Image (cartoon, rainbow, N blue to C red):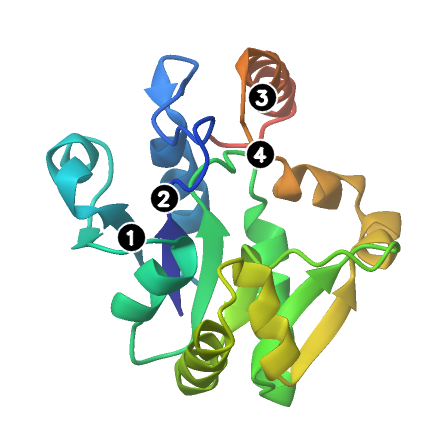
């Protein structure tokens, strides 16, 4: 399956080149995705005016001009099912990516979305069928929505309980961690060192 990283900033604090252990967080995110046995390649959706910057950090940047993540993804939508993450998720767990992709192929829903107990959904750590996602994004945009999470109103998606998965392997929780500021950088660097000490490749 194809991996897709979205790096399209909508808020001032969204910085996908923030250094973690001396490397841009987006590069670490791409590397982790590529460690997943079911991921055959990764595309990174970037702002057109930032193409030169991201070309230094990721293998296949896809430049787009858009006003939101939702519009950006619509313009760069692949023609096959894909696993989507945000570019500030350096602790994404390859075993979890593999498992979610396997579930997707078993049931072939429009999308497979991890869900927290409180009902919040991880739309940027999920598997999507492109035709269904295109219809959902176009419907959401037609309603005037800009937040990507609103697409779920127009998708027949399969939810997966994050807490239930974490009971089997606590490292599941790390996969959803996002680096947004210096405190997050410190946590990510400490966690990476701990995982390396246990033999986890990075």
The disc label shown at residue 45, or none? 1
Q: Which residue is mark 4?
A: 178
Q: Which SS class for mark 1?
A: strand
The disc label shown at residue 94, or none? none
Q: Which residue is mark 3?
A: 188
Would you identify the image quadrant in which residue 8 lies? Answer: top left
Percent of width and height locating residue 148: 52, 60
Percent of width and height locating residue 82: 42, 69
Would you identify the image quadrant in which residue 16 lies? Answer: top left
For the residues labelled 3 and 1, the Cα–Cα distance comes to 23 Å
For the residues labelled 1 and 2, the Cα–Cα distance comes to 6 Å
Give the side of residue 20 with respect to residue 52, left or right: right
Percent of width and height locating residue 105: 56, 82
Give the side of residue 114 with respect to residue 149, left or right: right
Point 56% across, 84% down: residue: 110
Q: Residue furthest left?
A: 52
Q: Which SS class for mark 3?
A: helix
Judge the density around disc 4: few (<14), some (14-19), many (≥20) Cα neighbours within 10 Å: some
């Amino acid at each position: 399956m194809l991996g897709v990283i979205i790096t399209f900033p909508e808020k001032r604090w969204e910085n996908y080149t923030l250094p973690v252990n001396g490397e841009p967080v987006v590069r670490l995110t791409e590397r982790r995705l590529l460690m997943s046995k079911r991921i055959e390649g990764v595309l990174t959706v970037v702002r057109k005016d930032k193409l030169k910057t991201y070309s230094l950090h990721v293998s296949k940047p896809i430049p787009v001009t858009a006003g939101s993540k939702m519009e950006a993804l619509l313009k760069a939508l692949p023609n096959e099912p894909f696993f989507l993450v945000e570019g500030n998720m350096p602790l994404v767990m390859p075993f979890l990516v593999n498992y979610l992709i396997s579930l997707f192929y078993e049931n072939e829903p429009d999308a497979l979305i991890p869900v927290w107990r409180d009902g919040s959904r991880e739309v940027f750590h999920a598997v999507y069928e492109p035709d269904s996602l295109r219809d959902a994004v176009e419907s959401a945009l037609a309603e005037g929505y800009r937040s990507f999470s609103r697409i779920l109103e127009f998708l027949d998606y399969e939810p997966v309980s994050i807490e239930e998965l974490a009971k089997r392997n606590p490292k599941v929780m790390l996969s959803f961690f996002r680096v947004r500021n210096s405190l997050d950088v410190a946590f990510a660097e400490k966690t990476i060192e701990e995982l390396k000490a246990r033999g986890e490749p990075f």
